[in-house]
Image: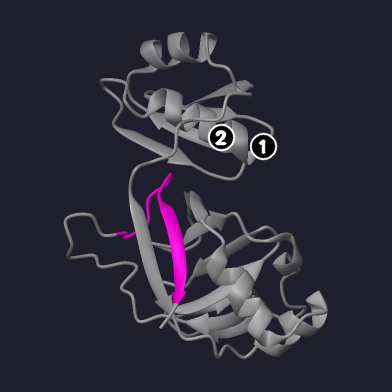
Amino acid sequence: MLLRRCGTDALLVEVDSLSEVAAVRAALEHLDGIEELVPAARTVLVKGALPQVRDALKTIDLTKTPAKHSREITIPVVYDGPDLALVAETAGITPGEVVELHTTATYEVAFCGFAPGFGYLTGLPEALQQPRLDSPRTKVPQGSVGIAGEFTAAYPRPTPGGWRLIGRTETTLFDPRAETPALLQPGDQVKFVVA
């Protein structure tokens, strides 16, 4: 674990894996004085309470899997994405089997980023773990559900993107007027179901 100072009141914690990011987040999220905690693929940015953060990090066990977050979110999906056939062909299975694999898995929000409300979800079955498209789209429609590498996600708004799109959802993933604008938060458990 490597600690880097970020300005006067923040610290960047660098680790080696998503599981270690989850362990750091779980160890720090309930500390008094934390103003902001931002997990990413291999880092956690912590703002506030730096002495307490340093003390907590001295005793953290990065190999210990944190307890699962209690919030469960279900996202209905229409599986008619433009890359559904490509994903099936690449995996050597049928489009129906892609849908079955995608809907039987339980996912966890590892971190959020790229765009407001965009949650990177881990737990994608190995057969569906595929590379991004060779050429990204200039505009991915809001609600598109895609896969890339070890992640699956739903696009909260229209943006460019290179993920393989397998479906779409009407679920509002980001509402700037809401008390909590982003539906998905790190640690949430997510299930996709056929709409």
**SS at circle 2:** helix
Where is residue 39 drawn, in percent x and y? 49, 40
Q: Which residue is mark 1?
A: 17
Q: Looking at the image, which residue is at 32% across and 60% down? A: 183
> Taking 184 as reference, is 137 above or below it?
below
Is label 1 in contact with label 2 (beta carbons under 8 Å)? Answer: yes
Where is residue 60 drawn, in percent x and y? 53, 15
Quadrant for the N terminus, please.
top right
**SS at circle 1:** loop
> Taking 23 as reference, is 50 above or below it?
above
Q: Which residue is mark 2?
A: 21
Q: Is residue 157 or residue 153 the one in the foreground?
A: 153
Q: Looking at the image, which residue is at 67% across and 37% down? A: 17
Type of amino acid at the residue the image marks with label 2: Val
Label 1: few (<14), some or many (≥20) within 10 Å?
some
Please say whether residue 189 is one of the residues in the magenta stretch. Answer: yes
Q: Quadrant of residue 31?
A: top left
